[in-house]
Amino acid sequence: MDAIIIDLRDRLAQSLPAPQPQDRGALVRATRNALGLTTEEFAVVLGEQIGWEVWPGHIKAWESGSARVIKEVAEACHRLAVNIKPPADGRTPVEHLAALRRVLIDADNQLGSAAVVPVAESQVAVIGHLLDGQDGGDRRALLTLQAQFAEFAGWLRQDGCDFEQAQYWLDRSLEWAHMAGEQDLATYILLRKSQLAGDMGQAADAADLAEAAARMAVPRSRIGATAPCFGAHGYALAGQHSAAERAIDRALNLEADADDGSSWAIWLDPSYIKMQHARCLSALGQHSRAAAVFGDAIGDIGGSYRRDCGVYLARQALAYARACEPEQAVAAGMRTLDVAGNAQSGRVTAELGNVRIALARWQRLPDVARFHEALTDVIPA
């Protein structure tokens, strides 16, 4: 630890622009995480930087936002972020942060977005500070990673049904992807913007963005095969049944022929396309058929997608309720609580809330009453 402190003290002479107040709490947390230090260790390092004693309680208060981060602390964190040394295992900061992103993606799949979003957004801040003074290939690598983290932050906000923040992060991600010259990533973000537009009920935007992504996609790519899925949802929201069905058929044909070796849209498979088909059917008012298609696809979902399975079960429950099949709706709803009741996911909560509303007319049925009682642990009445 002494060696780290001495090395950091030697770098104090650098003159760097101060972080803005709204970024300071995230910067404290992100700098500590990037250095791989505990709260106690970071308090020692930061105290050496600013010349007065820092306690672990200070760090916790700054990171949580319960105490204001003064300018001197923010500037010290900024200097530390810019001068982060490669981890002891030999990985570069870019490799270290890329590995962290993969860990966070796994955590999101298992736990839902609420537990992950603060960490993901803080990494965007620290990468922004790492960019200072970088050029050439190193700068492009950091811009690419920043775009990837911003896209992920957009997804986390989308899962939390915070659509305004999701749009903000996807817009920033698209900007950074273009700056980095990452055409595939930029195309994937257009695809994600189409998906978000569909979640927001914006039919025309969902279809137009999907078509744009399809035009930009590399032939035989998974991105190109995914685009018709999200375009189909846009068509369904607009009541265009034939166009939606054609888009789903196209997605199935393209997925079977996809072979680009890309890491984007790796989750695309026939079961995912079935899920999108079922969602289109729900939007078109074909609720019985939608529930059946949801059922066909849910059994094919891997165990690593626990939260997503909960979303699809909740959507199946809603389809059953709207098809006037309350017993089936309750069964699917109870499975949702078993699978993803503890997942901190706004999508799960929102869909279950819709199920409760759709079942209101059958609230005197014993099964429905039991479901409503179980649901109060997730969504207060």
Image: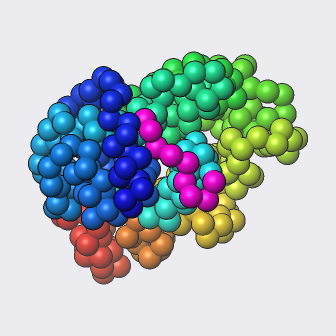
Q: In the displayed image of the protein, which residue is found farthest to the left? A: 67
Let me know if residue 84 is in the magenta part. Answer: yes
Seen from the viewer's position, the closer of residues 159 and 238 is 159
Seen from the viewer's position, the closer of residues 198 and 61 is 61
Q: Does 356 sit above or below residue 233?
A: below
Q: Is residue 363 left or right of residue 288?
A: left
Q: Quadrant of residue 326?
A: bottom left
Give the colour scheme shown: rainbow
Residue appearing at x 76%, y 40% in the figure: 262
Q: Does 216 sit above or below residue 277?
A: above
Residue 265 visible somewhere in the drawing = yes
Q: Does 217 sit above or below residue 64?
A: above
Residue appearing at x 25%, y 72% in the figure: 377
Q: Is residue 160 left or right of residue 252?
A: left
Residue 285's spot in the image, x, y percent?
51, 43
Let me know if residue 123 is in the magenta part. Answer: no
Seen from the viewer's position, the closer of residues 193 and 338 is 193
Residue 380's spot in the image, x, y percent?
20, 64
Residue appearing at x 43%, y 31% in the figure: 128
Residue 273's spot in the image, x, y percent?
68, 47
Q: Is residue 260 left or right of residue 295?
A: right
Main SS of residues in magenta: loop
Seen from the viewer's position, the closer of residues 373 and 359 is 373
Residue appearing at x 82%, y 42% in the figure: 261
Q: Quadrant of the C terminus?
A: bottom left
Please count the marks in the image: 0
Q: Quadrant of the N terminus?
A: bottom left
What's the magenta region? 82-90
Residue 107's spot in the image, x, y percent?
49, 61
Residue 234 visible somewhere in the drawing = no
Q: Quadrant of residue 265?
A: top right
